[in-house]
Amino acid sequence: MDNVLKSSGLSIGDLAERTGVAPATLRMWETRHGFPAPVRRESGHRRYAESDVEAVREVVRRREEGVRLDRAISQAVDRARAAAAPTPESVFATLRSRHPHLQPQRLTKATLLALSWAIEDEFCARAERATVFGSFQDARFYAPAAPRWEELARVSRAAFALAAGGPDPRAAHVHHVPLAEDSPLRREWTVVCDSVDLPAVLAAWELPGQDDVPDRERLFEAVWAVDPPAVRDAARVLARVAADAGVDEARPVLFELADDPARHAADLATVSMLFNRVVAYVDRFGRS
């Protein structure tokens, strides 16, 4: 049944059943507002895309919040367009292009671990309803972090782990995203905490030609930030990769991330805690 729907689209009855909006109402919206916009078959029957399901649900949510119908539809269409826009798979390249003030630093894997743990502890674990992402290059690198990420997933709105190879069989709450063989993320290391109160992102690109370098001494170029626009851009890239990989849980997240984040000044106390935690972890790793 799913394969049939994917090839031929959703009927108006399918769309009504999955959104709770009556067919007559959907037809009225189309007549008055041009939404949702179906493809017409030769028979004249309407067919809708999977993306129309979340768009209609978004209109319903907006209406329940008291937004006028025309405005709710306009907002839903804008978000759907933004979510559908092509996005490069490289988080590091996206941040360097869209946020050139983020100057990369060369760090060893040991230092990246310290910075990642600090972000996970001071941001991901403490944020209110955060959506968190981590890309680990390969499943063997994710395995040691799996218990830690399971705990983060329990306190997050959603958690996604991206890596080449199969998912960790112990996983219960983390959504696993397989990386294609040619994905730029197979050379990247990322931690993203997209939240209103404690946003943070770390993105690093592994320098080539390190086949003989000990694992903890591998070098990366890394950038990090706590400003919401940079965090949101990184989250969009990873949510898009997850959705394209067929992870259904990523689709509503991607839709939500289409909105621009609320701007706020960085909390200096939180940044100080992050710095202190990084120093502590670097010191620990340096002595281990």
Image: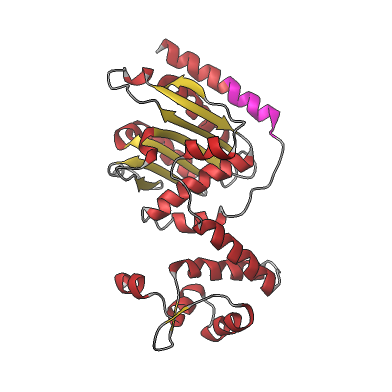
> Which residues fall within the magenta stretch?
266-276
The answer to whether residue 270 is magenta is yes
User: Can residue 104 be seen by looking at this rendering?
Assistant: yes
Q: Kindly identify the residue that appears in the image at 44 percent across and 39 percent down.
A: 134
Residue 98 position, x and y percent, is 58, 40
Work out which residue is located at the far top of the displayed protein and give it: 287
Quadrant of the image occupied by residue 127: top right
Q: Which of 9 and 266 is in front in this view?
A: 9
Image coordinates of residue 236 in percent, x first then y, are 51, 48
Instruction: Please tell me whether residue 84 is drawn above or below residue 122 in the rendered image.
Output: below
Say which residue appears at 47% left-offset and 76% top-offset.
15
- Look at the picture and state if 143 lies above or below 34: above
- 16 vs 71, left or right, is left
Residue 165: x percent and y percent? Answer: 28, 42
* Residue 186, horizontal then vertical, whole percent: 35, 37
The chief SS type of the magenta part is helix
- Above or below, 154 against 9 in this view is above
| Image quadrant where residue 47 sits | bottom left
Q: Would you say 52 lies left or right of 272 here?
A: left
Q: Who's the residue at 37% across and 33% down the image?
A: 187
Is residue 200 shown in magenta?
A: no
Relative placement, left or right, of 152 versus 1 is right
